[in-house]
Amino acid sequence: MNDATQLTRQESTKAAPAESRRAEKRLTLSPAVDVIEDAHGITLWADLPGVARESLEIRIQDGNLRIEASANVPTRDGLRLQHAEVRVPDFARSFTLGAELDTSKIEANLKDGVLKLLIPRREEARPRRIEVAVG
């Protein structure tokens, strides 16, 4: 700790819960994503560090995909945060999906802070080979 950092203890008879205090200072970030497209559809990878499955929401409406999530830094029961230099963010990102994608068959998987979305193409929009008859 350096001289510029000061810790103060504020005594209050009516203290707000820790979640309420943190919610006031939340930072919303746009998560980094990788998008891979192939003949079968799109695979989207989004970095969501500190996000649990329960605080992740993925919505589709009118051809728009919306990802919203809240990161959480777990603290042990009975401990109270005195000082934090890292702000725990919320994440939000939107994408417009083409009509050739089948939004009813999207698969989502969250592992180690990385969200993987598989968005398949509609069967009729997939490339196909047409056999040519001779004769």
Image (cartoon, helix red, strand yellow):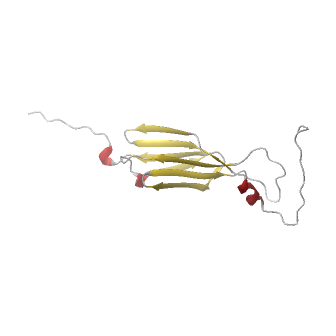
| Horizontal and vertical percent position of residue 7 | 89, 48
The answer to whether residue 13 is left or right of residue 132 is right
The answer to whether residue 10 is left or right of residue 44 is right
Query: Quick check: 122 above or below 1?
Result: below
Q: Residue at x 89, y 57 (%)?
A: 10
Query: Quick check: 70 above or below 114?
Result: below
Query: Quick check: 85 above or below 23?
Result: above
Q: Residue at x 52, y 45 (%)?
A: 116
| Horizontal and vertical percent position of residue 48 | 61, 45
Q: Residue at x 74, y 59 (%)?
A: 19
Task: Please name whichever residue, 111 or 87, is drawn nearer the observer in this view of the structure.
Answer: 87
Task: Please name whichever residue, 5 or 135, is drawn nearer the observer in this view of the structure.
Answer: 5
The answer to whether residue 61 is left or right of residue 90 is left
Residue most extreme to the left? 135
Q: Residue at x 73, y 47 (%)?
A: 87
Q: Quadrant of the C terminus?
A: top left
Query: Quadrant of the rendered structure where residue 54 is?
Result: bottom right
Task: Please name whichever residue, 22 or 135, is drawn nearer the observer in this view of the structure.
Answer: 22
Q: Quadrant of the N terminus?
A: top right
Give the total number of marks visible in the rendering: 0
| Horizontal and vertical percent position of residue 101 | 38, 47
Residue most extreme to the bottom? 14
| Horizontal and vertical percent position of residue 123 | 32, 48
Query: Quadrant of the rendered structure where residue 127 is?
Result: top left
